[in-house]
Image (cartoon, rainbow, N blue to C red):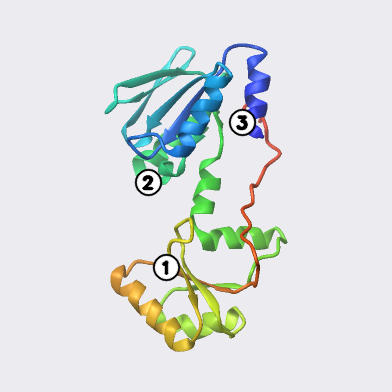
Amino acid sequence: LRFGNFLNESATNSPVNVVILSGTAKPSKTSKQFMKVCSDRGIECHVINVNNARIKKVYNGHVIEDIANNVKVSIDPNTTAIVPRRGVINNSHTISVMKALEDARYFCVNTLDSILACENKFTTCEIMESHDLPVPKFALVPDEKSLDAALESVGGKFPIVMKLLSGSQGIGVSLVDSYSSLKSVYQTIKKLNPTSEILLQEKIDSDFDLRIQVLVKKLNALDP
C-alpha cells in the first residue's frame, strides 16, 4: 500500500525508480516479483546486494553502487523508493547503508527499526503487547535455571511452543509436549549454539496459519 501510494504520487511529478536492497547475490523470488511489477508499469528497478553497497552523495541525491556486480544507480529522495529485504540487518555494514538512506530521508519500505523488531520474536511480542494487541503468553529464557519460571509464565501446561528469537517459515520452532522434552530440546539448542536465545509461548489451538501485514499511517517519508 505505501509502495503503491508513493509510486502513484511521485509519478505525477517526475519519473520514479525503485532500488531493492537484497542480502543475496542473486535476486530472490520476492525481488523478482517487485521487478516484474515495476517493469509492467514502466518503472526503473534495480537490485543492489547490500553487502557490497556503497553510497556517494551527489548534487541532486546520491549514487548507490553494488561494487561486486558493477551496478551503479542514481537515486533521489524525492523520486526513489527503497525496498529493503531482510539482508539489510546482516551486519554492521548493511545496517549502516540502510541507516544512511533513512537519514537522507528516502522513502523506505520497511524501516530499519521495523525490520529489527520483526527479526526478534521477543521484541515483536513486547511491542504488540505494549499496544494492547492480544498475543499468546510469552517468556524469554536467559538460561536453563530460568526454564521453570518461564514455563509458569506461559501457563504451566503442555504442549507449549519453543522458538529461536530469529527465523521464519517455521524454522527454529518446536512443539514441546512434556517437561523432559522441554529440557532436552533446550539443552540441544544450547549445545549446538550457546549464544542462542529461546522464547517460550503458550500454544493457541488453530486450524489455520495467520500471516498479517502491518500498515502504518506515515505515507510520505519527506514529511517531518
Q: How far separated are the C-alphas under marks 3 and 2?
A: 23 Å
For residue 139, which quarter of the picture?
bottom right
In this figure, which residue is indicated by the disc labeled 2?
90
State which tag comes first along the sequence, 1 or 3: 3
Q: Residues within 10 Å of mark 1 (few under 14, many from 20)?
A: some
At label 2, the amino acid type is Asn
Picture coordinates of residue 120 (x, y %)?
49, 58
Picture coordinates of residue 148 (x, y %)?
50, 86
Q: Is 72 located above or below residue 23 in the figure?
A: above
Q: How far separated are the C-alphas under marks 2 and 1?
A: 18 Å
Q: In which quarter of the image is the N terminus?
A: top right
Per the rendering, the mark at residue 50 is none
Q: Can residue 80 be seen here?
A: no
State which tag comes first along the sequence, 2 or 1: 2
Per the rendering, the mark at residue 3 is 3
Picture coordinates of residue 62 (x, y %)?
44, 19
Q: Residue at the location (66% across, 63% down)?
A: 129
Q: Residue at the location (40% across, 81% down)?
A: 144
State which tag comes first along the sequence, 3 or 2: 3
Q: Residues within 10 Å of mark 2 (few under 14, many from 20)?
A: few
For residue 107, which quarter of the picture?
top right
